[in-house]
Image: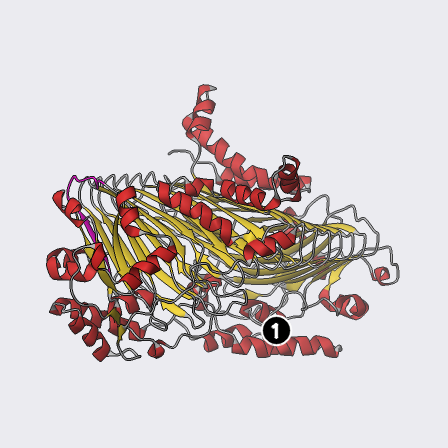
Amino acid sequence: MSAVLQNLVNQPYKHGFVTEIESDIAPKGLNEDIIKLISTKKNEPAWMLDFRLQAYQHWLTMEEPKWPNVKYPKIDFQAISYYAAPKSKKKLNSMDEVDPELLRTFEKLGVPMHERAALAGVAVDVIFDSVSVATTYKQKLAEVGIIFCSISEAIQMHPELVRQYLGTVVPVGDNYYAALNSAVFTDGTFCFIPKGVKCPMDLSTYFRINTEESGQFERTLIVGEEGSSVSYLEGCTAPKFDTNQLHAAVVELVALDNADIKYSTVQNWYAGDENGLGGIYNFVTKRGLAKGVNSRISWTQVETGSAITWKYPSCILRGDNSVGEFYSVAVTNHYQQADTGTKMVHIGKNTRSTIVSKGISAGHSNNSYRGLVRIAPTAAGARNYSQCDSMLIGDKCGANTFPYIQVRNQEAKVEHEASTSKIGEDQLFYFAQRGIGSEEAVSMIINGFCKDVFQQLPMEFAVEATKLLGFKLEGSVG
Amino acid sequence: MVTSNSYLESLLQGRPQLPPSPLAWFNHLRANAVDRAGTLKVPTTRDEEWRFTDISPLAALSLKPVRAASSLEAADVERFYLPEAKNRLVFVDGVYMPHLSSPTGPDSAQDPEVVVVTDLSTAVLAHAKAIEPHLGRHAGFQDNLFAALNTAFLHDGAVIIAPRNVAVENPMHVLFIATQSGAASHPRCLFIAQDGSTVTILEDYVTLREDVYVTNAVTEVVLGNNAQINHIRVQRDSAQAFHIANCAVSLARSSRYRSVSVALGARISRYDLNTRLEDEGAECAIDGLALITGRQLADTHTCIDHAKPNGISRQSHKCIVDGAAQAVFNGKVLVRPGAQRTDSAQSSRNLLLSAKARVDTKPQLEIFADDVKCAHGATVGQLDNEELFYLKSRGLSEVAARNLLTYAFGAEIIERISIASLRHRLEQTALEQTKKTEL
């Protein structure tokens, strides 16, 4: 039985290939000159350079966080190249002009984007390494006044908006990796939904790390004005490499009065081979500020990749009656390590938050949920419900839960529950009785286990996530 | 803030007065602890283990060593005695009081059927063989300043040894009375239940005056195969006092440890309870209640370490927080690799009664085995409106209904205490403490 599980777990990474495209790479190392180089290359205004330098100064004074429950060799930040851009410089007007090599890459990933864009009506702002090369559906979005573009473009075209919101949710000195990102981010996504606009389609971005040994520092900023709503999808895959790649992204969401932002992620970066060699270090800072009254921020994530995941999508519930949600499935296998969870900081009155976290660990992996629920003295009537369940597959893996609950208001109500379970012999026997093989049974049990989270995903993502989990755990249950 | 070293010096001041023991290992243990204490720093809120408990007010105190020879008479302390307890060990400011105590006689050394209840300095000589493998071996002081300090002061203490296959009927009462202002005492307990024995022990901390003092206790509890200990711990220190306590429990095969700890007193109290299920089939049930108000802080850190398969653990911790008090709970359940079929359940429930009260709770699970059943839950809230409404519909006033519900919340833990007279006393105390005359 465990042999079947082993096979499931030991499936090679299906998306491991390298696209040979010439890259324009900055020399390795990090100093003020490199930051100036990035800023000059991207033709940025002076305030942006100041922002970066300020972040860099902060970063120099900070230390790498030691508290996460993960182990990895010390990262040499001077051995990383902080800028890589595809050489093609001319602007593209249609998909036909995109480098065919690039298109083939997406083909291999199973993301035929023109098809996908047409069929699913999804605008895909394709990020290849660090520079945005093609953007679709811009026109359609522009009609309703939505700005959806790369952040470097936004810095050129809408500097006042970027300047107003950038760094307001995750300040430059927030944490070690956020400071690093603020100093050297090369590209990312900017999205602005004006007052009263409901975004007519799901917005989506595909990230892909390509150049070996180049860390990728994404910066995403989504602003929802009064009464607006948007659903944003982020999906990731990366090619197979033996040296670790660092990824330190920052995502900031701002929701004003009555705005609603939904942010979904499916992350399937290269996790290293079955011996724990290679894989992406995913050190991400994601935070949403529910600034206005009745605003809502919802995070949904399916984390299956990366050698190390260190990620806590958070909600600062400042507006009265604002709502924060966090739905997460984290799957670890082989020697993967995940320390992930959320922070719900209740500041406004009658703020509500829900946390549903499902962790599945197999192989020699380690999966931790780390969450914080803080009820400030001002948050009268605040309400939180947290549920975090773990499932262990095999006896070499670990599942940990570290929920911090801090309550400073007597009118608040906070509930937390956690449980740990495994796929029982009796469950598999029941399936076998009804003629369902163990592999399919495991897939069904796991999908049932994760149902609460998958329900929150947009349709296409839910299908993809179900499949992803299936082959991620192929051979690991028996 | 006082630097850590001068603070330690002030704490270690009383040490030279301790007479050396004729036993080399005993002196060695003490000397090791002194060395270790010298290298450790006073924890601050920057240490994860002390993140919510700021003990800088403790570090700022200038403490005196305990003056020996208390003149307390039985009449002064009789009210703390329990009618059920035939054997009692009384310590005043950490110093053993033979005239107030009723240990088992010296014949206990010869008779293998008689439980040993005596003070440490007598016990180490008469029962060295039973004590040496355990004293200072379970409550590690390598990384724990307070345990190191306590061990450095190792002299007086309570020793209870339940012999093989003996079920001790009457509860044993270990009473620590604080009387001196500004003094630091270091109570020490060693409870051993040998294979197949059963014993009930009350560890009781009381005071005769509302004053500033420091209690730094260490308790080691050892259970042999199939042994059972009911350990009740009541902390009723002065509301200005500091109470730091470390308790280490070691469970052998199929042994059962039940513990109820109640914290009512102290300005800042901190209780570290480490329970290690060292062999298969061990069971523990750990319950706690903190009932605090004013500017009190009650911090409970527990660790239940499932090292071997088939272990069972149950934990229920409750805090009732009023005034501007703060309750901290950190409950770790660790299931080590190979500890299959572990069954663990933990709950942390907290009741906030005032606007300034605060709670920091962290139930923590670390699991490294797949065939386990582990669950934990935490709630923070206030009295249920529907329950209040129900009581009011039966004619109770708002105040009476609130008092009743608050009391009932805590009573669930107090009811688990097996000694009737103590249970009754604590119920009265809880009733008084939770009674509010107006809203």
Residue type highlighted by circle 1:
Ala
How far across and how far down the image is residue B382, in percent?
42, 37
Residue A228 colored magenta? no
Residue B207 is at least partly visible in this image: no
Q: Is residue A10 above or below residue B17?
A: above
User: In the shown orientation, is residue A268 left or right of residue B155?
Assistant: left
Q: Nearer the viewer, residue B322 or A148?
A: A148
Q: Position of residue B163 (x, y in %)?
A: 82, 56
Residue A191 on the magenta segment = yes
Closer to us: B378 or B94: B378
Task: Name the chain letter of the residue that bears numbered label 1.
Answer: B
Which residue occupies 84% across, 59% down? Answer: B108
Please rate how many residues cluster around mark 1, counting C-alpha atoms within 10 Å: few if below 14, some from 14 to 19, many from 20.
many
Picture quadrant where residue B369 is located = bottom right
Q: Which is more toward the observer, A203 or A403?
A: A203
Query: The N terminus of chain B is located in which quarter?
Result: bottom left
Q: Position of residue B421 (x, y in %)?
A: 66, 40
Figure colour scheme: secondary structure
Tag 1 residue: B152
A402 on left or right of B337: left
SS class, disc 1: helix
Image quadrant holding the C terminus of chain B, namely: top left
The quarter of the displayed image where residue B38 is located:
bottom right
Question: Looking at the image, is A317 positioned above or below residue B399?
Answer: below
| Rendering quarter of residue B186 | bottom right
| The magenta segment | A188-200
